[in-house]
Amino acid sequence: MIVSLVALLGVMFVSPAFSCPEMCSCSAREALKVANQHQAALCKEIPPANLSRTITSLQLIDADISTISNTTLKGVSHFLVSLDMSLSGIKTLDPRAFDDSPHLTSLHLSNNRLEKILSGTFRTCVMLRELYLDGNGLREVADGVFAKLDNLEYLYLERNQLVHVPGKLPPTLVTLDISGNSIGPVVTEHFYQNSLKSLDLCGNLLQSVSLATFSTVSNLQSLCVGDHGVNLPLDTSTHLPHLTNLTLQGDATGKAVMDRVTRGEIAKLGALETLTILHYEVTNLRFLDNLTRLQNVKLQYVSVTGDLDLEAAFLNKLFLLRVNLDGSAGLASALLGDPRVVTHLSRLVQLSLRDTGLTHFEPQNLLLVNHLYVDISGNPLQCDCRIKWINDKVYNLLSSQNTKCASPEAYKNALLKTAAEELKCPPDNTTPSPDGSTSSSIHATSDSDHTTVYIVVGCVLGVLVVIAVVLAVVYRTMKKKGGSRVTPHSETPGPCLQQVQAASSKDHLIKK
């Protein structure tokens, strides 16, 4: 009975109705050990109707579909859970196109040529959790088009041409990415849901953000704002107590100035774990002092015009793992030039110093940091024997294919790793390792060197012993002389003076 049932199932699943379409490549589902069970199909064009119900994921590759009508996906998408039509050249999307897709949880329409999304387009996709509309050049999204998607958690609208935030967002939304649009210059929208945890407004035309924007998103954990020197409003820290990831992005064409209010609000965000500041001019870095939970700090293309106290900035950063100072020449110089700073970076695992004008980077710059990955690409590096540490694996080099020599002429534009392998260095060229010892591959000490050291140390010790003996003899002699000296002005005669007086009286009696 059981054998017959298995045989029947096998016949069903190898029948033409359940086979993989000719223009597709299908992957087997490992969970079910039945022949010809398919889970995912990768196709060059939309497959014919009556697609096998065992295929729950469909991805189009190199497809050229200008229009998705109300019949294009009929019979194709009914059992699909995931549909990816990115890079398919879609210009027009009928609002009824997904009426036969009730089970979709993930829909990718990225990098097409859509200009607008009409009302009702996703009305039957009640199970949708992820919707990707990024990179389309969208100018218009109908108000309320996402409102009834009660299971939607991730909405990506970045790199379009939207001038405002789409209204009536679902209350289940967790991530909203509308970066790289034309929104601005002021964001005043209320998002009306505490479920939102990630909001990306970077890359727009923003000049300021209203406090009302943050008034209803108290559970927000990740925030990115900026592109034209946006500063945070007063009481931002009060409304965003759970923020762990903050990015402030200035205008890349000029230095944005961070105001006092913004510095004060950052300093109060005690839960921050990742802080990224790009293209800003700041008066000081005191806003870092009390952020003790920081794990990642990115101060890229940042200049400090006032007091630069890096030691205080990195004090008590017990969890700090990654520091990125790309394009911040002043900060990079201060970090490598102040040994007090390094004492607070013992747990660092990654340091990026790209485009900071470095000509040298040596292990003694960060002597106390072990197991460090460094990125020093994009700098005018001078390749001499001081870079032999690469071969000794003192530190691990990131972006090695972009790390090249600027001088001397013999190694100009050569890879730093290649130069380090080819350099012929004298045996006395020493490069300390992070634990303070000398690397054997850079400085090998011979037996004769040890003998010479022992002789010198022995001679020094011998001289010190002789000096000690001489000093002891001199001290003893001076002590004896000091004890027998008679002081005429002494009020109380000492023992020696009494003996002399007694001997004189005895001689006088004998003479009599």
Image (cartoon, rainbow, N blue to C red):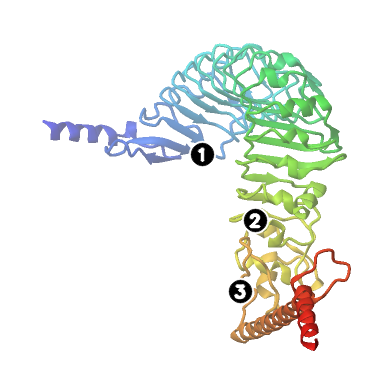
Return the disc, 2 or 1, that comes first in the chain's sequence: 1
Residue at x 77%, y 26% (from the top left corner): 264
| In the rendered image, the vertical position of residue 382 relative to residue 429, given as above or below | above
Return the disc, 3 or 1, that comes first in the chain's sequence: 1
Q: Residue 44 got which mark?
A: 1
Q: What residue type is labelled 2?
A: Leu
Q: Outermost residue toward the front?
A: 512
Q: How crowded is mark 3: few (under 14 residues within 10 Å), some or many (20 or more)?
A: some
Q: Which of 27 and 317 is in front in this view?
A: 317
Tell me the quarter of the picture where residue 360 sits.
bottom right
Quarter of the picture containing the N terminus is top left
Tell me the quarter of the picture where residue 412 sits.
bottom right
**Left or right: where does residue 221 sit relative to residue 10?**
right
**Rendering coords of residue 421 (x, y %):** 65, 72
CA gap, disc 3 to disc 2? 20 Å
Q: Look at the numbered disc 2 and give the secondary structure of its residue.
A: loop
Q: Nearer the viewer, residue 408 or 503?
A: 503
Pair 3/2: label in front: 2
Question: What residue sits right under mark 2 in the picture?
Answer: 368
Quarter of the picture containing the C terminus is bottom right
Tag 3 and tag 1, C-beta contact below 8 Å: no
Q: Which of 167 and 329 is in front in this view?
A: 329
| In the rendered image, the vertical position of residue 349 relative to residue 95, given as above or below | below
Q: How crowded is mark 1: few (under 14 residues within 10 Å), some or many (20 or more)?
A: some
**Rendering coords of residue 400 (x, y %):** 66, 59
**Rendering coords of residue 324 (x, y %):** 70, 45
Residue at x 71%, y 41% (from the top left corner): 298
Pair 3/1: label in front: 3
